[in-house]
Amino acid sequence: MSKISQSEVIAVIEKALEIKPGLLGENTRAEEFDNWDSVGQLSILVALDKLFEGKIANINEMAEADSIPKILAILRQHSLV
Amino acid sequence: MNIENQTEIKFSLGPDREIELAFAPGVFTPNTTTNLLIQAVKNTISEPATLLDLGCGTGVVGLALHFQGLIKSPLYASDLSKPAVLCSRVNFDRYECPAEVRDGSLFQPWAGEKFDIIVDDISGIAQSVADVSPWFQGVPCDTGKDGVDLIVEIIRNATQHLNKGGRFFFPVLSLSNVDKLLQVARECFGTVERVGRQDWPLPAELKAHLPLLRKLHEEGSIKLEEKFGMVLCYTEVYCATNPIY
């Protein structure tokens, strides 16, 4: 699988949260969007798991990743972006 | 109309609409299940119908369907909780939704009456989970060991209250015995279709009770899935048709 870009990850998160494209940035935090609650977090993880072909389901720290920087940092640690 | 300790809550009906609802202690707070139920009914029916909102709480399910033009006036609604009956009347008046609201348990206020659509807004969870959950503070929840007693009674009685061709919508939570509920539904209706599903993480308040939940899961009283470092539950909405008398 070729590496996926940060902008692709952010676009997938926007779609999962039903947020208009372009509203999320590299520093966005969950508290800035009502949709990014616990159900929204689960929607993000399901969408990212699909994007990364099942590689997210076993990364437990993703459950607590409540911002774009945290999500991207975990993906980098696992060499996914 | 004077409702003791009345407050207001906001409820989102989608990205473009949020409504304010009269609310009071003893009234069930609309939640993910409420939204899923609204979406499922909206996606399934296409023209106005006589509709009973059973266990109406604030009345938000009926209101949402009224806004979509899916109610043949008046809307019928009932709840066991007197504050819920009062709040829903306020909310129906506020949003100019003609409604007949009655108080009473399950189908008791609707003896001998039939509807095109029945939306069961009452869901059950295993009693021992309800006892430690934050969801039923001041709201009746006597649903039995595996959370199905009330819903089984509703499913069995719904067959007597549907017009020919009618549809009965009901939610099922994985914190109850899903298999038992669906078995009863299939005994009572010729067709039982899943029309909605939402997975959701176990709320923080219940994480402290994971040993209890895992035990109930092993006994088959509830279903849990562990994934993404989360403990996951789900709500499904079913549409039942073709009652078997």
Image (cartoon, coloured by chain):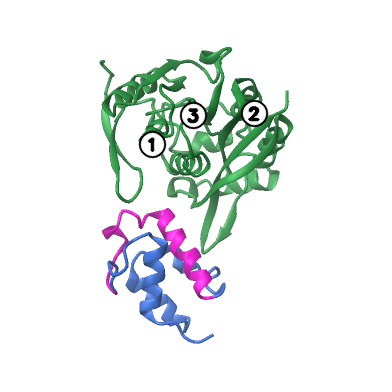
Chain colours: A blue, B green
Residue sitting at the far bottom: A2
Q: Residue at x 53, y 42 (%)?
A: B44
**Mark 3 crowdedness (10 Å alpha carbons): few <14, some 14-19, many ≥20:** some
Q: Residue at x 64, y 20 (%)?
A: B160
Q: Secondary structure at mark 1?
A: helix
Q: Nearer the viewer, residue B64 or B179?
A: B64
The boundaries of the magenta stretch are A26-52
Q: Position of residue A14 (x, y in %)?
A: 36, 66
Check disc 3 and report the residue beneath it.
B49
State which mark lies toward you, 1 or 3: 3
Q: Position of residue B213 (x, y in %)?
A: 58, 46
Q: Nearer the viewer, residue B90 or B143?
A: B90
Check disc 2 and report the residue beneath it.
B152
How far apart marks 2 and 3 lie (CA) works out to: 25 Å
Q: Residue at x 56, y 19 (%)?
A: B114
Q: Position of residue B216 (x, y in %)?
A: 64, 43
Host chain of mark 3? B
Kindly identify the amino acid type of the residue bearing the numbered disc 3.
Ala
Kindly identify the amino acid type of the residue bearing the numbered disc 2.
Val
| Quadrant of res A54 | bottom right
Host chain of mark 2? B
Number of callouts: 3
Q: Position of residue A64 (x, y in %)?
A: 41, 63
Q: Secondary structure at mark 2?
A: helix
